[in-house]
Image: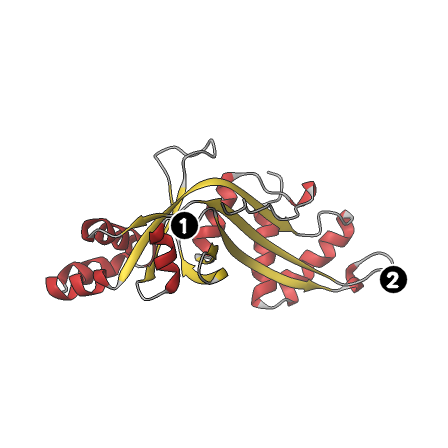
């Protein structure tokens, strides 16, 4: 019996409980890390792009899932198909950036790192029938490149079957999740304003992406 994966450390002022923010994170940063305890290989992790899935109304935070696929040759696939893998952990990482203490009010300060991350827990449901995988690929295409859908449908049937045979799809119904946004909420208003101004006007692309999240989370 594999242990339940614990939650990440998330002080209250860094916690983002709004599901819309989790969905935005997945849409903007779909390349996740799938972590599991493989009975053969132990603790393992693999990068895999995933998409959000939900019933027509998931505003309550219940009933949503993640979807993706792995190469059949990936050793994780055998573990997942064996049914011996328990709870998995999926992590999406958003933008992150160094924060200089020069932005703070007192010289008795030290650097830190601001970032956004989302952790999702659940159990994998394998999708390995041809129709199910075809539908999954079409949902992935619709999310990432809708214009490619016609080209996929136009590929020779035998070629499509070969490609579908080389992958195994999956769905992870979400049992619990935590989104953490460490954006200097524990600093003074003046300090936060200086950090934001630096990121927006002088920052790297990563810093500018972080600043957009700060603006996104401003009270309206």
Of badges 1 and 2, the one in the foreground is 1
Q: Residue at x 66, y 48 (%)?
A: 9
Given residues 16 and 199, the one toward you in this image is 16
Q: CA distance from mark 1 to mark 2?
A: 53 Å
Residue 125 — which label? none
In the picture of the structure, the residue carrying the numbered disc 1 is 84
Residue 130, how many percent across, how many down? 19, 53
Q: Residues within 10 Å of mark 2 (few under 14, many from 20)?
A: few
Say which residue label 2 marks: 107
147 to 129, vertically: above or below: below
Observer able to see residue 163: yes
- Considering only vertical position in the picture, is 158 above or below 138? below
Residue 156 appears in the picture as rendered: no
Q: Position of residue 2 (x, y in %)?
A: 50, 47
- Mark 2 secondary-structure assignment: loop
In front here: 77 or 193? 77
Which of these two is toward me, 2 or 89? 2
Q: Residue, x 56% and y 44% (percent of image)? A: 178
Q: Within 10 Å of the Cα at label 1, are there few (<14), some (14-19), or many (20+) other Cα atoms?
A: some
């Amino acid at each position: 019996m594999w242990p339940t994966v614990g939650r990440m450390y998330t002080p209250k002022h860094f916690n983002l409980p709004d599901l819309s923010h989790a969905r935005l994170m997945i849409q903007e940063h779909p390349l996740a890390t799938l972590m599991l305890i493989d009975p053969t290989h132990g603790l393992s992790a693999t990068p895999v792009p995933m998409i959000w899935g939900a019933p027509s109304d998931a505003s309550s935070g219940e009933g949503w899932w993640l979807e993706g696929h792995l190469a059949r040759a990936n050793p994780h696939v055998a573990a997942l198909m064996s049914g011996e893998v328990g709870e998995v952990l999926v992590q999406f990482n958003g933008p992150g950036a160094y924060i200089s203490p020069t932005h703070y009010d007192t010289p008795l300060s030290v650097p830190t790192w601001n970032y956004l991350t989302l952790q999702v827990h659940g159990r994998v449901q394998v999708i390995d029938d041809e129709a199910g995988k075809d539908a999954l690929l079409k949902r992935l295409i619709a999310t990432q490149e809708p214009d490619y859908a016609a080209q996929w449908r136009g590929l020779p049937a035998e070629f499509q079957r070969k490609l579908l045979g080389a992958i195994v799809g999956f769905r992870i119904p979400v049992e619990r999740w935590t989104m953490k946004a460490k954006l200097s909420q524990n600093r003074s208003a003046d300090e936060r304003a200086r950090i934001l101004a630096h990121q927006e006007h002088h920052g790297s692309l990563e810093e500018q992406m972080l600043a957009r999240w700060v603006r996104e989370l401003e009270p309206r």
